[in-house]
Image: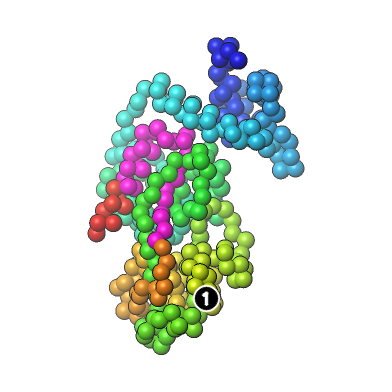
Amino acid sequence: MNIAKIDLNLLVYLDVLLRERNVTKAASQLGITQPAMSNSLKRLRDLFKDPLLVRTSEGMAPTQRAKELQPIIREVLSKLESTIQTSTEFSPSTSNRTFRIMASDYAESTLLMEVIKKLNQLAPNISLDLITPSDVTFLDVEQGKVDMAINRFEELPQSFHQKVIWHDEFACVVNKQYALASELSLDNYLKAKHIWVSKTGFGVGVGIDPQQIQKLGWVDAELTKLGKKRDIKVFTRHYHVALQLAKEQNLIATLPRRAADLYKQVPEVSILPPPFEIPPFPLKMAWSAILQHDAGHIWFRRLISEVAEELIDS
């Protein structure tokens, strides 16, 4: 194949088609007619000798070949755009941009509260739109509809850029009057009733089956290695709910140390190390290749990193 004979606009069209998975929406985004978009799809199919997009009961879906091409084409176009575009300065002090961030309440409470303080000082007109993990899909981030995802991720698409913000260990939050908490041995831990709290990754949750230990996360995975199982009374996706329950009820919340420390000044609770080893976990931020070279996005990523470093050192 002679690359000199290829219309490189077709790669731009394919990039948008694979993001939108809809000919009409792709045409609208590119500012061309639907027939022109359909004709471009036909040319792309001829070029790659593959259907690329096929109709299913849920709409257009990419073929395996298209899935392989998507991150490669996105990277090529992203590098090309950054090379030929005139770099523009970003002025945080005058910008009125809104950054849309997917984050769990763990990330909101431990990291983003401090980021907001910095924004108020450095960029008073910038706004944050904070979205829960249940409201976002991988596709939303990949398409740049969401600027950033900040959470604990078990896995991420290879097309995403990502950075570890920090590693956090686990702690147990208990009411000081809870008899079993006076000496938090493994035996007492297993006799107690517990609060499970977690919301990793993306998408809508479908409920928890207490019998499916492998899906309960880090804490229960480590107990399973010991041949043990805790008695979970409450399942929640909200760290503040878990903290409040641990304060007011005879329940133990085992959760990230930085979340537990939100209650370190509360006189009714004790924050104790777990009576068994749980490996630290990484909090990550992830974003689309579409935004990798955006000046404002670069500034915002740097701000988050700087705030995180200050919190780690404090």
Q: What stretch is highlighted in magenta?
A: 280-305
Per the image, label 1 sits on a secondary structure element best described as loop
Q: Nearer the viewer, residue 286 or 164?
A: 164
- Relative to 18, 276 lies left or right: left
Q: What residue type is labelled 1?
A: Lys
Please say if 110 is above or below 142.
below
Q: Which of 59 and 153 is in front in this view?
A: 153
Q: How is the image coloured?
A: rainbow
Instruction: Tell me residue 119's x, y (percent).
Output: 31, 48
Please say if 311 is above or below 193.
above
Q: Which residue lies furthest to the front in this view?
A: 226
Q: Residue furthest right?
A: 57
Please say if 204 is above or below 301.
below
Residue 148 in view here: no
- Relative to 295, 41 lies left or right: right
Q: Residue at x 56, y 15 (%)?
A: 3
Q: Residue at x 31, y 39 (%)?
A: 92
Instruction: Tell me residue 284's x, y (percent).
Output: 42, 50
Quadrant in the rendering for residue 259: bottom left
At label 1, counting other C-alpha atoms closer than 10 Å, the crowd grade (few under 14, some 14-19, many 20 or more) is few
Magenta region includes residue 290: yes
Label 1 sits on residue: 228
Instruction: Tell me residue 82's x, y (percent).
Output: 41, 26
- Relative to 189, 10 lies left or right: right
Instruction: Tell me residue 150's x, y (percent).
Output: 43, 51
Please say if 125 is above or below 151.
above
- Locate the N terminus and report the quarter of the image it occupies: top right
Residue 205 in view here: yes
- Locate the C terminus and report the quarter of the image it occupies: bottom left
Q: Residue at x 47, y 50 (%)?
A: 102
Q: Residue at x 49, y 76 (%)?
A: 194
